[in-house]
Image (cartoon, rainbow, N blue to C red):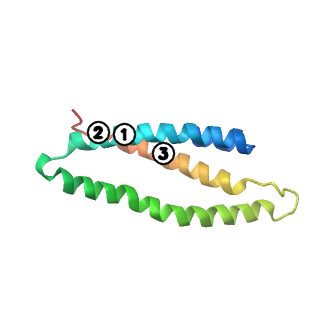
């Protein structure tokens, strides 16, 4: 995930290349989520409470996305304005670079935190 974010920032200078990179990112993220769901089911303490536990986990997965969308929009807009402020860079992508680098950082953090999960079969 982090590598894809960096690639989009570094290589995605046209709409076509950005769409290709984002498609690859989406496919990779889908695989990540499938493994994530399987791992969660393996570490649940009580199989009879699996539905309740998965609901809590789903909220924990969805709530940050709901908060990140408007926050990311504000960051994107703010840094786009900063990048274009001097008039010398009307095609600035600073906002997108900031958002994708931030996403890469969060993905790296999640990689470190997932290593601390114990008890996966």
The residue labelled by disc 1 is 34
Identify the mark nearer the N-term, 3 or 2.
2
Task: Write the residue at 72% across / 55% down.
Answer: 94
In this rendering, position of residue 32 left or right of residue 53? right
As helix, strand or loop, the secondary structure at mark 2 comes to helix
Q: Which of the numbered marks, if any, corresponds to residue 101?
A: none
**On the image, which quarter does residue 5 sit in?**
top right
The residue labelled by disc 3 is 107
Identify the mark nearer the N-term, 3 or 1.
1
Q: CA distance from mark 1 to mark 2?
A: 6 Å
Q: CA distance from mark 3 to mark 1?
A: 16 Å
Residue 116 percent coordinates (x, y) = 31, 41
Q: Circle 2: is it few (<14), some (14-19), or many (20+) Cα within 10 Å?
A: few
Q: Which of the numbered marks, if any, corresponds to residue 38?
A: 2
Quadrant, the C terminus: top left
As helix, strand or loop, the secondary structure at mark 1 comes to helix
Q: Circle 1: is it few (<14), some (14-19), or many (20+) Cα within 10 Å?
A: few
Residue 77 percent coordinates (x, y) = 67, 65
In this rendering, position of residue 28 left or right of residue 18? left
Q: Decide: marks 1, 2 in contact (CB < 8 A)? A: yes
Q: CA distance from mark 3 to mark 2?
A: 19 Å
Residue that lies at the very extreme toward the right in this rendered image: 88
- Figure label count: 3
In this rendering, position of residue 53 left or right of residue 58? left
Q: Circle 3: is it few (<14), some (14-19), or many (20+) Cα within 10 Å?
A: some
Q: Nearer the viewer, residue 77 or 101?
A: 77
As helix, strand or loop, the secondary structure at mark 3 comes to helix
């Amino acid at each position: 995930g982090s590598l894809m974010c960096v690639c989009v920032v570094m290589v995605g200078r046209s709409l076509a290349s950005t769409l290709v990179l984002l498609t690859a990112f989406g496919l990779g993220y889908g695989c990540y989520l499938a493994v994530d769901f399987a791992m969660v089911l393996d570490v649940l303490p009580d199989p009879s409470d699996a539905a309740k536990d998965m609901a809590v986990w789903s909220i924990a997965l969805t709530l940050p996305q709901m908060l990140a969308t408007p926050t990311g929009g504000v960051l994107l807009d703010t840094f786009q304005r900063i990048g274009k402020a001097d008039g010398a860079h009307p095609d600035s992508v600073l906002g997108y670079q900031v958002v994708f680098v931030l996403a890469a950082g969060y993905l790296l953090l999640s990689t470190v935190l997932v290593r601390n999960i114990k008890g996966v079969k």
